[in-house]
Image (tube, rainbow, N blue to C red):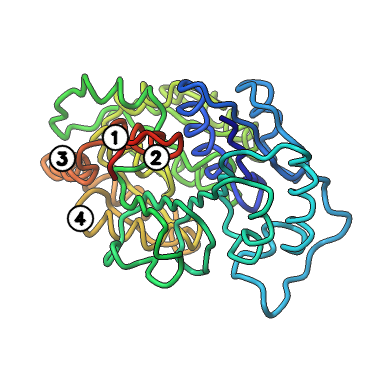
Amino acid sequence: MKVVIRSDASLAIGSGHVMRCLTLADELSMRGVKVSFICRELPGQMIDQIEGRKGYPTARLPQPEAEYVAMPEDVAHAIWLCVSWERDAVDTIKALGDSKPQWLIIDHYAIDQRWEEKLRPYVGKIMVIDDLADRQHDCDLLLDQNLYDGLDTRYSGLVPETCTKLLGPHYALLRPEFAEAHKNLRQRDGNINKVLVFFGGVDPSNETEKALQALSVINDRMLEVDVVVGISNLHKEQIQCFCASREGFNYHCQIDNMAELLVSADLAIGAGGTATWERCYLGLPSISIVIADNQYEITKAVAAAGGTVCLGYCSNVNAEDIATTLRHLLKNPLNARDMGKRALSIMGSGPSQKNRILVDVIIGDGHAKA
């Protein structure tokens, strides 16, 4: 069986879409599926990581020669393709060549029903990974791994009636290391001695340094801090210098042991997106800051369930806001303990089991039940 994944990473898009697609690709590959990617050459792309570190063949769509200007009929995130949807569809068809994969998996906010209909003759079935529910899709399978009010009806009228929908954080695409870490979770008592800071692979507004500034003014106890950045983070050298100048601040770049760091931490400070479900699955209390519009509803829902403290949009949050919230949790360990328990309860039966169900649906296992 052949599966092709169409997704992009860039300074504007971030790395989260490609990262969760890589998790799915690994699950499929372990079941004998031949997986390849189609990605556009963009500043901040992850094609080298997909090919080099993961070994998945990747067709490179050409970098645009000029900035794309959105048209009135475009979807909300159309500029993330950096070309028109028609151009991207043509480029993708060309990249497919004579191969007709059994599945085309799309994880891209700029792609909708029009693009998918154009690709229909060249693929077997289409899967869409989405978070927004803001446009129509022509797909056979849809995954939305997030927590929302009215989740069951969220895609009514946006996908065909025959479409299989896998909805909710218990379908979150988390790497196997998280399932292993989940088996041996320690009971946190709410006391905070070790903090993990991670704002995604790109962090364009440098929320990481804002969090580090907040941590550096906590003087009543010695905190150990793990700071994780992606290879595409434009501020990584500056952050590395910050950490090197302070005792107890440990710098990590483009790591593969995130679950290990999360398990050892007592608190996380970070953004929304897939990292939210990583923290919840391992029962880690957190302070969350919204760095993109698509994170707001998700983060608000997790906060309403008691699984995080949401400080709001990054543009409205400063280092002192983070420090104030951190001091409150340091003084009230039972609050932190309960937050971790509520975060854990959000995940239901757990992504490891649901990821297997998702793969079963794709490869056609008749025993798979959503």
Name the residue located 43 percent from the left edge and 59 percent from the top edge: 317
Circles 4 and 1 in contact, beta carbons < 8 Å: no
Quadrant in which residue 65 is drawn = bottom right
The CA distance from mark 3 to mark 1 is: 32 Å
The amino acid beneath tag 4 is: Ala
Q: Secondary structure at mark 2?
A: helix
> What is the C-alpha distance between the residues marked 2 and 3?
31 Å
Q: Residues within 10 Å of mark 3 (few under 14, many from 20)?
A: many
Give the residue at mark 2.
Answer: 361
Q: Nearer the viewer, residue 357 or 145?
A: 357
State the CA–CA distance, disc 3 to disc 4.
11 Å
Q: Is residue 264 visible?
A: no
Q: Which residue is denoted by mark 3 in the rendering?
A: 341
Residue 301 shows which numbered tag?
A: none
Q: Return the disc, 4 or 2, that comes first in the chain's sequence.
A: 4
The tag earlier along the polypeptide, 3 or 4, is 4
The earlier-in-sequence mark between 2 and 3 is 3
The amino acid on which the numbered mark 1 sits, given as a three-letter code, is His
Nearest to viewer (mark 4 / mark 1): 1
Q: In the image, residue 11 lies at what x, y percent?
A: 66, 48
